[in-house]
Image (cartoon, rainbow, N blue to C red):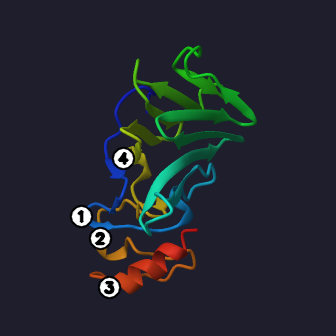
Amino acid sequence: MSHHSRSSLSRVLGSSANLGCFFRFEFNGLGEFTIAQTTDSDAVEIQARFEKCNANTDATCTTAAAVKGYGHTMRLYSSGNTVTVRVDSNTINIDSTQFPYSVGGGELVLLRDSGTLNFEIQTQNGLSLQYRLQEGFTMIGVGAGNNLKGKLKGFYGNFDGLRANDFETNTGTVINFPATAVEIFSWGQTCK
């Protein structure tokens, strides 16, 4: 897959999470979760952090996301109307950095829509993270190339086109579809 092209499948996460290929549910988790992870030997992982939106609510908002793979990590953090980007242990000045910005000879590539707080991290194996900050709210999306069909785990499901097995725990237990809210919550906790 060449970089800088749109992925063949995209999911958007904010206050709602899209899982697998066919269904949607509301997610209000608190903590850091694996959104998608490849199961091959070149494991690449996308994580997201969900924190309370404010002290007066139990609702959670996405405040950070990261892509880890090929010995590097790209992290994006939101606060108010500001995005901070860290690549490995370095903070990147998004106003003076030339995009696309890559590490590892192009294994991880950071793109930015000019003049916006919309970013995308693309990986050599076809997994990508879209990160958008708009009006103080962060939305994230995940894209995957067709080469990753059946080779993912996490909130994204395994990307095999079968919704019946998208709720699979880290131990391989599959939560039957349709799942109850309690089953979905319990499953989500296994993605921490």
Residue matched to label 2: 163
Label whose residue precedes the other's in the sequence (4 or 3): 4
Answer left or right for 83 relative to 68.
Answer: left
Label whose residue precedes the other's in the sequence (1 or 3): 1
Q: Residue at x 53, y 29 (%)?
A: 110
The label nearer to you, 1 versus 3, is 3
- Residue 104 visible: no
Q: Which mark is residue 180?
A: 3
> Residue 66 or 69: which is nearer the viewer?
66
Name the amino acid type tagged 3. Thr
Q: Is label 2 in contact with label 3 (beta carbons under 8 Å)?
A: no
Q: Residue at x 33, y 51 (%)?
A: 11
Residue at the outermost front position: 56
Image coordinates of residue 65 in percent, x first then y, are 54, 47
Name the amino acid type tagged 2. Arg
Residue matched to label 4: 146
**Where does the C terminus fall, quadrant-wise?**
bottom right
Image coordinates of residue 143 in percent, x first then y, are 39, 45
Label whose residue precedes the other's in the sequence (4 or 1): 1
Image coordinates of residue 36 in percent, x first then y, are 49, 56
Q: Is label 4 in contact with label 3 (beta carbons under 8 Å)?
A: no
Against 24, residue 44 (above or below) is above
Q: Is label 1 in contact with label 3 (beta carbons under 8 Å)?
A: no
The answer to which quarter of the image holds residue 171 is bottom right
Rounded to the nearest angstrom, the CA distance separating label 1 from label 3 is: 16 Å
Q: Which mark is residue 22?
A: 1
Q: Secondary structure at mark 1?
A: loop
